[in-house]
Image (tube, rainbow, N blue to C red):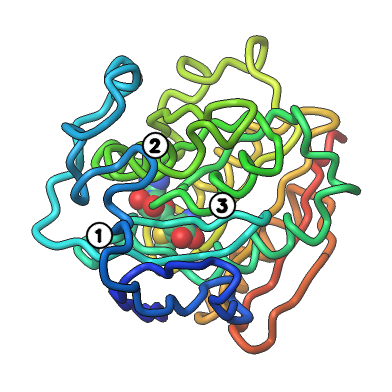
Amino acid sequence: MDVCLSSEQPPLHLQDAPRTPSGRFEPAPAAEGAPREEEEGTGGTPGDTNNMDPSLHGLQQFVPTDYESYTQEHYLFAGAKIVIQESIESYGAVVWPGATALCQYLEEHSEELNLQDAKVLEIGAGPGLVSIVASLLGAQVTATDLPDVLGNLQYNLLKNTLKRSAHLPEVRELVWGESLEQHFPRSAFYYDYILASDVVYHHYFLDKLLATMAHLCQPGTVLLWANKFRFSTDYDFLEKFKQVFDTTLVAEFPESSVKVFQGILKWD
Ligand SMILES: C[S@@+](CC[C@H](N)C(=O)[O-])C[C@H]1O[C@@H](n2cnc3c(N)ncnc32)[C@H](O)[C@@H]1O
């Protein structure tokens, strides 16, 4: 997996923190007596909701994911400092390169994408960076993933969007290809954007993933899919994707081998 983890102290002054091309920024050492990151926002110690603002307990639908060890990564998107609680114990608990690329794309194109109040659903949201950035840019976000990563996902979403976003993001279970019409009936759900980052890699659910992407799209829906291309199977998926979606390559990040595609479902 092409992710690099660090667990430095958070910066004292955001403006002093240099931002890397991936959106991750390098924290400066905290001054003595400065508040620690854990004392800011809604969070306490990682994974712990006991220190959370009492008004938030009702929102906590998912138990914190029980990973042995956590680290915190710092990002800077949409003018906000974002802290993501990660664990290397799950693919769904680390930020992948497609996520930072998609965040950069959303940030740079926020006006033309018109994300303000847009209805957005992310599939395979993992630790939630893309959903957080879409929410900070004004969208009404539903972040989805497998059940076991939802606790950490919700923790990160709350910590980074509460009192910052106009619409508090929602977290829902969505297993690719499973009971889609039951849980996300097309007659009841409409999304302006479906977002997906690094959902294509070496796994057995690629056909179910493509069926899920198609199910969630209706006329007017734009799917934005960012992926690091590593394996020949990634390109095989792209060919199948092109059969189902009118596909445009909208951005490329050669330094990370990430491509961002826009897909519009074919209706003929
Ligand atoms: C490589 S991670 C990418 C996470 C995040 N999108 C990012 O780019 O940082 C793939 C994500 O897809 C989710 N996933 C894998 N198989 C899935 C399935 N069958 N149904 C739903 N989500 C799945 C994983 O839990 C994980 O969060």
Q: Which residue is mark 1?
A: 90
What x and y, as percent, mark residue 14? 54, 66
Ligand 1: does it lie within 8 Å of the C-beta at label 3?
Answer: yes
Task: Quadrant for residue 251, please give it.
Answer: bottom right
Marks 2 and 3 sit apart, C-alpha to C-alpha, by 18 Å
Q: Amino acid at mark 3?
A: Val
Whichever of callouts 3 and 1 sits on the residue coming sooner in the sequence is 1
Farthest residue to the top: give it: 188
Marks 1 and 2 sit apart, C-alpha to C-alpha, by 16 Å
What x and y, as percent, mark residue 41? 39, 42
Q: What secondary structure is found at the residue carrying circle 3?
A: helix
Left or right of residue 219: residue 95? left
Task: Quadrant for residue 138, please give it.
Answer: top right
Q: Amino acid at mark 1?
A: Ser
Question: Is 241 in front, or is 56?
Answer: 56
Instruction: Answer above or below: position of 69 versus 144.
Output: below
Q: Which mark is residue 130?
A: 3
Ligand 1: does it lie within 8 Å of the C-beta at label 2?
Answer: yes
Q: Which residue is mark 2?
A: 175
Instruction: Report the residue at 69% width, 34% height from top.
Output: 139
Q: Amino acid at mark 2?
A: Val
| Badge nearest the viewer, 2 or 3 | 3
